[in-house]
Amino acid sequence: MALSEARDIGRPSGRRWLVFVVAFLLGLAGLALVAGGFLLLTLGGSAYYLVAGLAMFISAVMLVLRSPWALLLYALLVVGTLAWAVAEIGLDWWQLVPRGDVVFVFGVLLSLPWVFRSLTRASPVPLRTGVMALAASLVLAAIVGIAALVTPDGNEWTHGLAWRGGPAPASLAAQDGDWPAYGGTSAGQRFSPLAQITPANVGRLERVWTFHTGDHPRPGDPNEFTNEVTPIEVGDTLYTCTPHDIVYALDPETGAVRWKYDPRIRVSPNLQHLTCRGVSYARVAGADCPERIFLATNDARLIALDPRTGRLCQGFGKAGQLDLWAGMPHVQDGWYQLTSPPLVTRGKVVLAGAIYDNAAVTMPSGVIRAFDAATGRLVWNFDPGNPTDTAPIAPGQSYVPSTPNSWSMSAADDALGLIYVPMGNGAIDQWGGNRSPETERYTATILALDADTGKERWHFQTVHHDLWDMDVPAQPALVDLDIPGKGRVPALVQSTKTGNIFVLDRRTGQPLLPVVEKPVPGGPAPGDHLSPTQPFSAASFFPRVPIREKDMWGVTPFDQLACRLGFRHLRYDGPFTPPSLQGSIVFPGNFGVMDWGGMAIDPIRQVAFAHPNYMAFVDKLVPQEKIKRETRGPSGGSDLKGQEEGLNPNRGAPFAVLLNPFLSEVGLPCQAPPWGYVAGMDLRTGKVAWHRINGTIRDESPLPLPIRMGVPSLGGPMVTRGGVAFLGSTLDYYLRAYDMRTGKTLWRSRLSAGAQASPMSYWSNASGRQFVVVMAGGHRSLGTQLGDELVAYALPKAG
């Protein structure tokens, strides 16, 4: 024995303690992978984790025994991990790194001189051989990692949009430089006909003013406190609202307050959300207020305000207000609320309302009502449970309970005399064994009603027997399209949670681009049934492939293994896997590929700007008898937090339901990134022209690192005639501008809070500039920073 080795044995050194620490950690990691890997293998999953865990543990034992075999075996583990990872997912940086980061770090520790010099040289495997093998494996891993880092992401592509010119449609002439409705106009395109801001000068945009609403969460507010407002601008005034339904009138040039109206809403403990997405504007003949701002409130009132003073219009309803609980069954505060602006068309104010999700099978009605904009008189009501009788309900009668409701924004074609209503589900979402024929008919549909009578003209169903909370979430967009072989057709473009983009003839509801019924998984929950097929549109952002085990993600092999185990434990048979007692993966999830923000459409170039998201959820049905009394939420609540995640009681149904995003134990998505994109679509053909990763993890990670991973977004975009699109919405706090032709980010501005809202644009005569405005107010249930800032941007003043 060499003298140096004898000294090492006789005298414990810092080097030996380091070896023992490394060996202990390596062995512990190996045992964890062995346990989880064995379970995964029994479930039909990858054998890698079991093999890797054994290799780690044996390497740790050899390290304690001071055998150079530890280095050689670990080198084989590094090379094997590399080969397995590349075979599974190729050179995808974000998926490659978590598969090997822990393996690589332990390899570096083993290659430290303080570690390998403690190993004996009296071995069949020379120490030099082990050291060289391990070093070579680490160099190889680093080279592959660098290659993955510089390899273009396969989730991005750019073919460019067919860029057509031409005059603006006549419908835009009336809009001029204003933004008089939630979606720009009642057509819901989210398009500004202004062109002062262009791709060439958008980089010069600067913040002009900031207005603080002063509306923050209060004791007793629901957890889902959200700032989702899109202001409107008419004449020389900007109008906005806050989660507590406080309305402000602002100077559009400076943001100075002209008036404020506080309806002092009653915040019930049973409210599911607290939000105001906007107000509406109307001109009314022969009334005390010839112009009016309409506000629909969270405590179910419709209020008419004088846009000049903010005072109540006394000639409307009862001293300027209507009680929207009139005629409602199952009256309970918080179960029925208005979160979206009403639609104003043909002298009528049309609105439906949001019904509390998954509280009980007996809930208020999803009735759609039209009121005279001058007097507040009920003109007609479309009750989805009694669809043929639209005459105003008689005093003392009630609408049919628990019918499909419309909580989003509607659109209107005044020339055709049609209203287009995006419909959701009735009563409870994930179990439908007792739904009526009328509920089955109108669930998840686009419903076209006669504006004068409320009679149904047509409806188109986007999901049959919806058990996945796939409400039609966004305002329909009306645009005239030059469809190949059909000429110019008045179209309706509907984005959906499934990612399907349905392009319909808005006169008849017939598809202009192909829609095909495809078989979907069977196996319903006890007492329920399923549709054997579901509609899939040729225009789509639907996920291209189902989730696979290899798509499971984590920052280390350990949380990735946990996600793989979750994937194998849960039921998943592809799109439209039904909810189950086992627990089912729902992808696209309840969050939706597209939610209420929808798309923005350029009606001149006939292209759309979208921001698709890809996040899975887990739905698990729970028999009512297994729910302990203390786990139930408050009366009317969907869970202990007062939001849609967690335990939803479904009182009166055989099952409650647990709803949660598909996350790892450390709170990260189990799916690999990217999770959020921006994309451009040619609406004439439905072809996706470009698709780009969007957003960073700056505001979601412990360190503010602006790493571009593609994060989810909730809100909506806006496009301009100048060829620039604007979008906030992401989980990082920016407003961004994009080139409509390619999706390239041209400009971004840092915000103080999340901008889970949709921007808008208008012209200010005071300075001769085009303004862009967005609410940076955050979204409590998404975890983004809350705020109260309405922010306005414009180009510098000329001269």
Image (tube, rainbow, N blue to C red):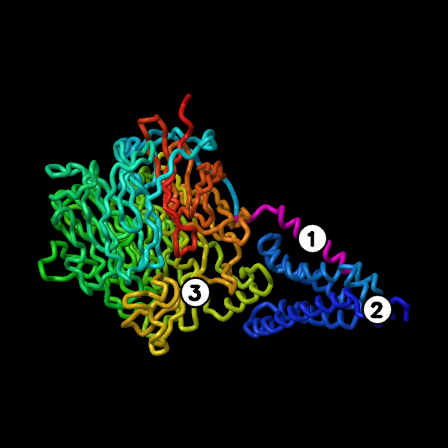
Q: Quadrant location of residue 172? A: top left
- Mark pair 1, 3: CA separation: 36 Å
Q: Which residue is mark 3?
A: 618
The answer to whether 596 appears left or right of 416 in the picture is right
| Main secondary structure along the magenta-highlighted residues | helix
Q: Quadrant location of residue 411? A: top left
- The label shown at residue 142 is 1
Q: Is residue 472 above or below residue 680?
A: below
Q: Give the amino acid type for the residue marked by disc 1 in the picture.
A: Ala
Label 2: which secondary element:
helix
Residues shaded magenta: 133-155
Q: Which residue is mark 2?
A: 8
Label 1: which secondary element:
helix
Circles 2 and 1: CB distance less than 8 Å? Answer: no
- Mark pair 3, 2: CA separation: 55 Å
- Mark pair 2, 1: CA separation: 33 Å
Task: Work out which quarter of the rendered image holds the N terminus and state it.
Answer: bottom right
The residue lying at 39 percent from left, 68 percent from top is 658
Question: For this rendering, which residue is in front, 111 or 123?
Answer: 111
- The label shown at residue 458 is none
